[in-house]
């Protein structure tokens, strides 16, 4: 009577939850994923939409993270060619820039090295004669423009495609399904959830808390409570502004605090400008762009693109889960944390932090940690080569 209906139950239909559902289904496990609202309702539709190694993470010497992300970027370009697109990135260096020409050049050389020195990892200095093509970028004080290659994707579409592929391999998608309580028994984990007005229960061998910024709330609903690490939700805002960005993505240094802000093409006719970093406390569903974030992003945009329209067509905010430290959010590690209920044969695991780009590698790690609690199954597919199915 207590036999689990599923091997793996996943709470949260963001990129991490669907990634785990796909990796688990591909490994032959029975999987159920519960999402309270809709796929990508949380951070996974509010990212900067870059599929990248993260050039700026080199400043914090997160070499392993950058190498893994670059490898995953290449995997995603292969398995999701309709969703993930290579983009040219430009790093303009001005007389006032803190990060000078040699610093950026050295960073790009290291980035290329971590990317395996393949053809697409090459970077170069753009000749001055091409500067006028740069979508209205100011040339006042400009000394050098570097060009390198990374990638971009519609994060929500990618999330839906991963879930679609997981369902193709037999995973069940329950939505709307809000997990309300969980109980870890000796041989099974029980999850209560609300499907509309109805209360239901499912049983699984192991559960994955992939609730992103809601992860702490979900952990607290378990009996016994799931272990948590000291993390905070940090809000990042984006603005959508009119006019196409035709040449590629711009990696800009904010004059006042030296953070990086991206201006990227979005939906053919818009510029996407982001992001910010502000500690967020409260219900993640209430995350909304603050007036000061709009001002901050608009002032960077005006500084670098003085002749482009600053009419805000849309603005949205997402929440990163980052380790709590006293330092600026910008300088905190982006490594994914995976606390478990117990070291040997864990039955419950939470995913804290992470990147859109690295979701597949994260899901692989999650399933490797949970494997001792699961029976051996016959693999159905390899997620490194399985093509994702767009809707
Ligand atoms: C501003 C910003 C920019 C970023 N830019 C990039 C980038 O350019 N490239 C990159 O690689 N990464 C980027 N990231 C990181 C990346 O977006 C996140 O790591 C990733 O989207 C997190 O996904 P997730 O699945 O963990 O969380 P989420 O996407 O938030 O998913 C959690 C899901 O859980 C659901 N949920 C919560 N509680 C329950 C419950 N009780 N029952 C059922 N469901 C529940 C929610 O509805 C939600 O859909 C960025 C992050 C931010 C904030």
Image (spheres, rainbow, N blue to C red):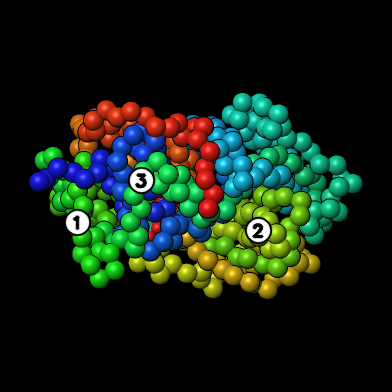
Side of 176 relative to 246 (left or right):
left
- Marker count (numbered): 3
| Residue 89 in sight | yes
Residue 238 placement (x, y as % from top left): 57, 62
Task: Please report the residue visible at 63 percent of the width from the left and 60 percent of the height from the top.
Answer: 273
Q: Residues within 10 Å of mark 2 (few under 14, many from 20)?
A: many
Q: Secondary structure at mark 3?
A: loop
Q: Does label 3 or label 2 sit earlier along the sequence?
A: 3
Residue that numbered label 3 is attached to: 171
Side of 2 relative to 166 (left or right):
left
Q: Which circle marks residue 201 in the picture?
A: 1
Side of 300 relative to 71 (left or right):
right
Q: Does label 3 or label 1 sit earlier along the sequence?
A: 3
250 or 6: nearer the viewer: 6
Say whether mark 3 is within 8 Å of ligand 1: no
Residue 13 placement (x, y as % from top left): 39, 54
Residue that numbered label 2 is attached to: 266
Task: Give above or below for 305 relative to 154.
Answer: below
Q: Give the farthest residue toward the right.
A: 129
Q: Residues within 10 Å of mark 3 (few under 14, many from 20)?
A: many
Q: Does label 2 or label 1 sit earlier along the sequence?
A: 1
Task: Please report the residue visible at 29 percent of the width from the left and 61 percent of the height from the top.
Answer: 178
Residue 295 placement (x, y as % from top left): 60, 70
39 or 244: nearer the viewer: 39
325 or 18: nearer the viewer: 18
Distance between mark 2 and mark 1 Cα atoms: 41 Å
Residue 325 placement (x, y as % from top left): 38, 50
Task: Please report the residue visible at 68 percent of the width from the left and 63 percent of the height from the top.
Answer: 270
Locate residue 340: give its quadrant.
top left
- The label nearer to you, 2 versus 1, is 1
Say whether mark 1 is within 8 Å of ligand 1: no
């Amino acid at each position: 009577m207590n036999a689990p209906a599923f091997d793996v139950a996943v709470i949260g239909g963001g990129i991490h939850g669907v990634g785990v559902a796909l990796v688990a289904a591909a490994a032959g496990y029975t999987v159920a994923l519960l999402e309270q609202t809709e796929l990508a309702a949380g951070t996974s539709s509010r990212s900067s939409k870059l599929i990248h190694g993260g050039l700026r993470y080199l400043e914090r010497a997160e070499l392993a993270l950058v190498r893994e992300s670059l490898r995953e970027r290449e995997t995603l370009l292969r398995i999701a060619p309709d969703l993930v697109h290579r983009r040219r990135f430009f790093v303009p260096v001005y007389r006032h820039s803190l990060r000078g020409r040699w610093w950026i050049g050295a960073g790009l050389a290291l980035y290329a090295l971590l990317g395996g020195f393949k053809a697409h990892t090459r970077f170069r200095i753009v000749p001055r004669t091409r500067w006028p093509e740069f979508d209205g970028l100011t040339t006042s004080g400009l000394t050098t423009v570097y060009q390198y290659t990374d990638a971009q994707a519609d994060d929500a579409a990618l999330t839906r495609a991963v879930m679609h592929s997981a369902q193709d391999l037999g995973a069940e998608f329950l939505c709307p399904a809000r997990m309300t309580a969980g109980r870890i028994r000796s041989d099974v984990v029980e999850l209560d959830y609300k499907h509309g007005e109805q209360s239901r229960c499912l049983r699984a061998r192991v559960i994955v808390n992939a609730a992103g910024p809601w992860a702490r709330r979900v952990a607290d609903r378990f009996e016994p409570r799931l272990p948590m690490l000291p993390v905070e939700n940090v809000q990042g805002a984006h603005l959508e502004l009119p006019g196409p960005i035709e040449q590629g993505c711009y990696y800009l240094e904010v004059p006042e605090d030296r953070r990086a802000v991206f201006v990227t093409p979005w939906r053919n006719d818009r510029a996407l400008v982001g992001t910010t970093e502000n500690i967020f406390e409260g219900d993640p569903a209430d995350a909304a762009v603050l007036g000061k974030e709009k001002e901050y992003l608009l002032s960077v945009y005006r500084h670098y693109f003085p002749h482009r329209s600053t009419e805000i067509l849309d603005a949205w905010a997402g929440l990163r889960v980052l380790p709590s430290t006293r330092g600026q959010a910008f300088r905190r590690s982006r490594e994914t944390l995976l606390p478990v209920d117990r070291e040997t044969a864990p039955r419950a695991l939470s995913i804290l932090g992470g990147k859109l780009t690295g979701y597949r590698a994260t899901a692989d790690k999650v399933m490797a940690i949970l494997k001792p609690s699961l029976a051996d199954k016959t693999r159905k597919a390899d997620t490194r080569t399985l093509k994702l199915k767009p809707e």
